[in-house]
Amino acid sequence: IHVPRCICSYGDRCKKLLEEDHLNSFTHPNIRDIRFLCKDADKCHDRHKPKHVSKFRHIITLEDSGIVRYYNLNQNIDFVQNQKDAVERVKRYVEKEKWERLPSGSIPQEIMDWIRTVRPVHRCRPEIFESILLHGHVMSRDYMDQLKDPVKEVILSNILSQDEIKTLKTTAIEIAQASIKLHADPAGIGHPPDKELGTNKNVFTVLGPHLGHYYGDVFLVFKREILHHPDANFSIQAATSYASGNCFKWRPWLGKDMTVKEERIKFFHKSKLHAAIPGYEYATAIELIALASLDLKKKSLDIDLATILDRWLSRDSHQNIEAHLPQLIPLDYIDHIYISQNMFDSLTSKAREFINTIFKNRITKTSHVIELAEKGGSFGSKPNSKIRQEYQDFILKDIMDKYGQLDINSISRPIQGTIITIPATDFNDPFVLPLTISQAYQQYKIEHSRISTDDTVYIYWQTMNGDMMLTLANEEINTGEQQPNLRCLICYIAEKPATKEIHYHESVSYLHSGGPFQHEIVIKERRYAAKSTSFFIGCNTDDFMTFCLEIQRSTGRVILSHAGPNSIYNHEQVAAKFSKTNLNMNELNFIHVSSGAHTVPIRNLIVTFEEHPDLHPTFDKQFNKVLTSSTTPVLTTRQDTTDDSVVVVANMPDTKDSKSSSFLSQVADKVGAVKDKFIGLFPGGAPTVLTPCPDGVNCLMQYSDRSSMHNSTYSHPCRFSELCRDHEPHLTHEPHKVPRCDSDRNCKDLCNPIHRAEYRHTGRPDFLIPCRNQEKCRNRTDEHRIKYSHGEHIVKPINSTQEKVSSLAQSNGSSQQQTSSDRRERIVCRYGAGCHDSSDRHRKKYSHPSC
């Protein structure tokens, strides 16, 4: 269904013509609403070209969002208070020293944009780079120390997954050799204070041009997303400058030096900033402006970006912004590599081959001949060697040209808030974010003089594929402790529905108040306060989907809805009202995210206290009045929390010819995949009483070309039995009382239709779709066999009515059916007549065309 969008008010003068979400939300001159899909997706090299983007849309694949493990390294850090204190210190110093204030009263936009787009840069030596490639991650010093004996699982079991340990085993000798190199000569200077500061658990980078030549001559430029991970943070100068006391000399507005080391370390943690926290740009900018002015002895805040960068390039890297990244970063977060050709040639052939394959379009090899034996060097902005100076200058210029002054409007997917990709955890490991609701409110009050009186919280986030949970709690959830006073609001986004299924089925998305580890119970016992099984209808589920959770703290009302482009096509709201005795919204403070059975990328998670207008585009309500020839209804579904039913409402034009029957035909034509959902709601739909089909779940007719006529007369058991949340009128949904499979999601017998009918498996239907080719099917893949049955006869009746019909059919059936019953009760061998296993054991379990 195409819904007419509102026309962008800026027309062809719009500055957001490179933003995917904006182009997917508004109509622009000479640009199709639904653009063609670029075959290169997010790896396209023409995404910065307006002409290309105006014609093609680009989706992000799951491979672009690697898992960066979460260790809660920023626990107990109040970043909002940190940035507030940083701004106040500079302002007090400016007033005391009688500096000239900001001319316009605000930070120049070019400085703010630079801070929002600048990338973290890491430097290392070739042998370290080779070890990084072999291990598949950029690693912190602490992680390297744990690789002294890499083949011992006892050391790695707390850090690596079983799959990663298995990988290590297969290359044990290579890993051991690389680990010996790392331990003998690890990346980073390795100052003793690093461990005391806790920064030994982070990957060191410089946020911007990196002049730390003593770290090595291989430059790794990271993607901006890594800076928004919950475990990341940055400081205006190196962490060691706090331990040494140098920061107090370099930035006099910090106050008097603290002579006690423990006090200095404590002050460092109170000086950390985070890119996911609103207002971090201003706190960073005011510090950089003050530093440049102090060096120039200008005594003025009238400083531009060029002046800041000039000072930057003349200082040792320890005097510039030091970014502390998560301690284990996958290679797919490396955006670009810089290395000289002779350094590249010094790597092993295996490493060179790997680089050319993985980083083919993301590496720059220069012609500089770098002294390979040169190591370390004195502190300062320039290396001792002339050739290394030229090499460094060349790369820094290229980095600044490519990343340094990026137009904020040239970014196809703007970044803000928290970004994290969560591994599958079955909702057993909630990750807490570095920003609480109360901290977000304190920051909001700083930036907004007028505060909303309705005390409403809006949480926006983007995710792929679903099967994730957003949990608000009155305490930080600790899986290792008893928390008797823990109270939670659970917001569950179901896994996106399969688009290739014959019948549309969508799992439940819901709101619930209770414990964080009760998902299976909530689903099984339907304990949710509000739910939906049509939350994805009309949405583009092949890309990041934007959601909004609105919490009205004064009334206890909570609303889950779509935001962004999908909100144009799906107006559904899952809403519930909670009493204060049940769940006091004012006490909820900590924000957690978790995932179910799949990896879930989450990005741009923000907390605000007013509706974000750009994230709530609307459709053109006047369009139907102009074009009366054809009208497409927009479906709105609202959840009534006093009743489990979902009411479907159609926004129809005000014409006398509008009738239910015409609405049905429009919906059936436009939304064929969900046609059955609406049949029972309108006149002329399916009859209310149907005769059970004698073939039950084995019926081929219900999926054939003549299914409409057949299904209008006969009913069939729903593949999801009583767990189905989308009760189609021609399907029955009586309980299928069977035990849950012990292996559940890890079951190796999912291709066996009989096993599937005898045991429950989370997220999968009880019965398979009968393949139209039955035993003659040549598709032997697991992907096909998990979904389709091939002549196996499911003898267990689904309900009492079905049992009677099946018994009658069997007693009156043909002799041919009785003769083949034994064969049909066996599993169809995927190799058919070509099977070479003639053993009695195999033939007893599996049927073959000749048997």
Image (cartoon, grey):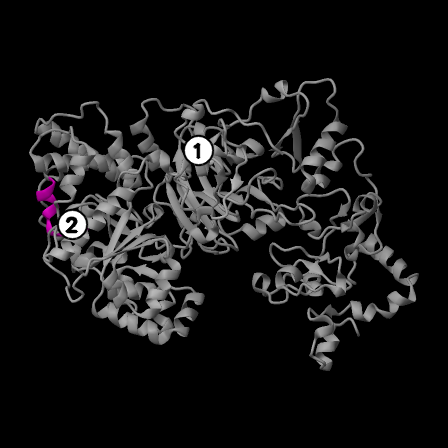
242 in the magenta segment: yes
Residue situated in front as seen by the camera: 654 or 726: 654
Mark in the foreground, 1 or 2: 2
Residue situated in front as seen by the camera: 402 or 63: 402
Q: Quadrant of the C terminus?
A: bottom right
Residue situated in front as seen by the camera: 73 or 515: 73
Image spot of residue 315 (x, y percent): 12, 46
Label pair 1/2, CB-CB below 8 angstroms: no
184 in the magenta segment: no
Q: How many marks?
A: 2
| Mark 1–mark 2 distance (CA, rounded to whole Å) | 39 Å
Image spot of residue 801 (x, y percent): 83, 52
Q: Is residue 149 visible?
A: no
Image spot of residue 252 (x, y percent): 9, 39
Q: Is residue 745 above or below residue 292?
A: below
Image spot of residue 106 (x, y percent): 23, 26
- Element type where label 1 sits in the image: strand
Three-letter amino acid code of the residue under disc 2 = His
Three-letter amino acid code of the residue under disc 1 = Tyr
Residue at 43% across / 29% down in the picture? 612
- Element type where label 2 sits in the image: helix
Q: Which residue is tagged 1?
A: 458
Instruction: Tell me the magenta residue range.
Output: 238-251
Q: Is residue 800 above or below residue 321?
A: below
Residue at 75% across / 70% down in the picture? 826
User: Which label is found at residue 665?
Assistant: none
Rendered image quadrant of residue 374: bottom left
Q: Which residue is tagged 2?
A: 318
Residue at 73% across / 41% down in the picture? 676
Give the mark nearer the N terminus: 1 vs 2: 2
Q: Is residue 8 visible?
A: yes
